[in-house]
Amino acid sequence: MLIFDNIIETQNFLKSQHGKSIGFVPTMGALHEGHRALVKKSIAENDLTAVSIFVNPTQFNNPDDLKKYPRTLEEDCKLLEEAGCDVVFAPSAEEMYPNLPQLKIDFGFLENIMEGEFRPGHFNGVGIVVSKLFNIIKPNRAYFGQKDIQQVAVINRLINDLSFDIKLVVCETIREKDGLAMSSRNRRLTEDVRPSAPKIFQSLVIGKKLLLEGNSPFIVKNKIEDFYNSNPEFKLEYYEIADFETLEPITEFDKKRKTALIVAAHLGGVRLIDNKVF
Ligand code: AMP
């Protein structure tokens, strides 16, 4: 496995691999089984797999969140080597941004809901860094997790609107045995709050059940808000019931259309997100 921190060297190496298909997994490191599943899928589908590890400062709207984001490069490289990854690209912020980008990307409606609403500027940062990474790695396929459902919509838009010749591959959410979606941020959950963490997934399971029983999205959202209020260790940011295709919030549930339940909540000062599609 080759590890690069330099853009030109990474590009030169990948250019020298004429004709090989490249699968790309962008990450912010602190890797876990969710990331490993993306890497494994890429390895199965491509001649070469490249993983980027970069905690992108421009997608953090909260400086404290950026400061506390776990960084475990050595462990990450071990996991990637074991998984069979070929290339790691782990640049510094200076390498990626010798000058702060002036370009702004506006994802329209997606900017005003859920992650867009609660993390202003987040998707602009994601859009710019992923575009840069696509131009550096030039992959045939890019692997993203369904856990970040709105990010998937944003990347889809980016690929279509900018005509990147890249196939977006979306991978299912990998969970702990108790249902908690794996996340780099889970490392920051302290022992006293960790037992409560599966309640986030439970709130999605309950929401689905209530909808299938005929409750309206409005009623379901109220009941879920009550659920979080009765678990005061949580601070609910949003719980949305949306059309899976458009991510637009729905007011009526239609069993024939795919629906997404999407949640963001803080637990012990750690921001967690999850979703369920059915
Ligand atoms: P991150 O390092 O959190 O930016 O995530 C890098 C990629 O891994 C993103 O495409 C995430 O959606 C994906 N990912 C994160 N957690 C999981 C998980 N539990 N299951 C599957 N994919 C995940």
Image (spheres, rainbow, N blue to C red):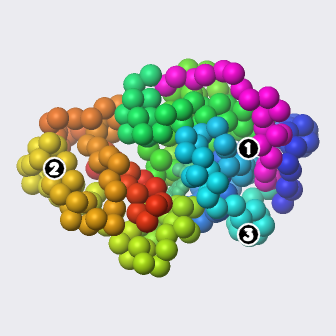
Q: Which residues are magenta?
A: 87-107
Mark 1 or mark 3: whose residue is earlier in sequence: 1
Dot label at residue 22 = 1
| Side of 215 relative to 149 (left or right) | left
- How dense is the environment of label 3, judged by Cα within 10 Å: few (below 14), some, or many (20 and up)? few
Task: Check the picture and name the quadrant holding the N terminus.
Answer: bottom right
Amino acid marked by disc 3: Glu
The answer to which of 249 and 71 lies nearer the viewer is 71
Report which residue position mark 3 lands on: 75
Dot label at residue 222 = 2
Q: Is residue 147 visible?
A: yes
Which of labels 3 and 2 is toward the front? 2
194 w.r.t. 153: above or below:
below
Residue 77 x/y as whole percent: 77, 64
List the single residue furthest toward the left. Answer: 214
| Side of 139 relative to 264 (left or right) | right
